[in-house]
Amino acid sequence: GCYPGQEVIEKIISLGSPAKRLALMIGSGPVPAAPTPVFFGASEVGSITSAVRTEGEGFAVLALLRKNAAGEGKVLHAGTPESGIELTVERLAQYE
């Protein structure tokens, strides 16, 4: 028989991986609120799903990023491309 969401699960399996990746990113300065868009250059590549303050002036965020923009060590921006809130991709969830 069938179950709810079966088509979506089968499509993900047949294509190899989801289009977006969950990423742990770090930054410093003001903590961005969720949801806040994430940019690479002038292109919006994802959205922050949650954010927390870490020790000192730092913060950590979880974000869903397009697969082609998600790379460990990559520097992205939160809010607007010229906002100055830099985020560095620390770790990516492994889906495979």
Image (tube, rainbow, N blue to C red):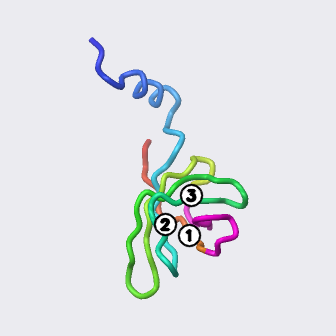
Look at the image and say whether residue 81 sits in the magenta stretch.
Answer: yes
Residue type of the residue flagged with mark 1? Leu
| Front position in the image: 56 or 92 | 56
In the rendered image, the vertical position of residue 9 relative to residue 21, given as above or below: above
The picture places residue 53, in percent across and down from the top left corner, at 39, 77
Where is residue 38, by image quadrant?
bottom right
Q: Residue at x 53, y 65 (%)?
A: 89
The picture places residue 2, in percent across and down from the top left corner, at 30, 15
Where is residue 37, by image quadrant?
bottom right
Kindly give the residue lying farthest to the right in the view shown. Answer: 42
In the rendered image, the vertical position of residue 53 relative to residue 46, given as above or below: below
Mark 2 crowd level (few <14, some 14–19, many ≥20, 10 Å Cα): many
- As measured in the structure, the alpha-carbon distance from the residue carrying label 3 to the one carrying label 1 is 12 Å
Residue occupied by mark 1:
87
Q: Is residue 53 left or right of residue 32?
A: left
Kindly give the residue lying farthest to the bottom in the view shown. Answer: 56
- Among numbered discs 3 and 2, the one appearing first in the sequence: 2
Q: Which mark is residue 25?
A: 2
The picture places residue 95, in percent across and down from the top left corner, at 43, 44
| Front position in the image: 92 or 25 | 25
Q: Looking at the image, is mark 3 or mark 2 nearer the viewer?
A: 3
SS category of the residue bearing label 2 = strand
Tell me the quarter of the image containing the N terminus. top left
Mark 1 crowd level (few <14, some 14–19, many ≥20, 10 Å Cα): many
- Among numbered discs 1 and 2, the one appearing first in the sequence: 2
Mark 3 crowd level (few <14, some 14–19, many ≥20, 10 Å Cα): many
What span is in magenta?
71-84
Are circles 1 and 2 on residues that touch, CB within 8 Å?
yes
SS category of the residue bearing label 1 = strand
Residue occupied by mark 3:
37
SS category of the residue bearing label 3 = strand
